[in-house]
Structures are given as C-alpha cells and as structure tokens.
Image (spheres, rainbow, N blue to C red):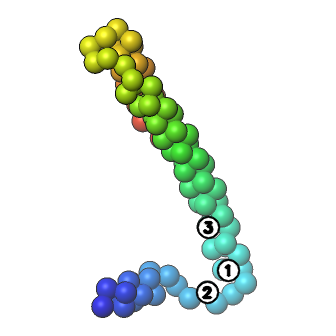
Amino acid sequence: SSLTEKSIFSIRKYTAIVSLEQRQHYKDDFNAEYEEYRNLHSQIDKINKDFRQFYEQWKSLIPGSEAYQVKKDKAMKAVLHASSVL
C-alpha cells in the first residue's frame, strides 16, 4: 500500500516533460544540484573519517588524563568547525 502511495505522490510531484527544451532545463537543474550533493557528501565522508580516527585514538587514552582532555578539546573544535563548514 505504501509503495502505491509513494508512486502516486511522485507522479503528482513532477510535471510531464513535453519538449526537448523542457527536458534539457530539468537535466541542467538536476546536474547543478547533483554536483552540490556530491560536494556535501564528500565533505561529510571526510568529517566521518576524521572522527573515526579521533575516536580510535581517544579510546586508548585514560579518562581524566591531560592527553585525554587535549584530544577531547581537539574533537570539540573539529565539531564546531565541521558544523560551520556545512
């Protein structure tokens, strides 16, 4: 039932393409937005990789130690930077 509802929704959402010019316009819009999506996805992948590395290093540190606190502070700065980039 939900698949049918999704199909109906997507049919309503998009207008039928009736000319080559209209098709090209939709294609250009898609390509412009797709590039932005790919760039954002790439940034998020890099941030995820950085945080996985931080976490792996942080796991081996003793809670409350200076090294632990330094790593925690660096991670927080990275979070703030990442949120400002996205």
The residue type indicated by label 2 comes to Ile
The picture places residue 35, in percent across and down from the top left corner, at 64, 56
Mark drawn on residue 23: 1
The crowd level at tag 2 (other Cα within 10 Å; few <14, some 14-19, many 20+) is few
Direction left: furthest residue: 64
Mark drawn on residue 17: 2
Between 65 and 50, the residue placed more toward the observer is 65
Write the residue at 52% across / 85% down.
15
Mark 3 falls on what kind of element? helix
Is residue 77 shown to the viewer in this render? no
Select label 3 or label 1 by which is in front: 3
Q: Residue 66 sits in which quadrant?
A: top left
Mark drawn on residue 30: 3
* Quadrant in the picture for the N terminus: bottom left
Mark 1 falls on what kind of element? helix
Q: Earlier in the sequence, mark 3 or mark 1?
A: 1
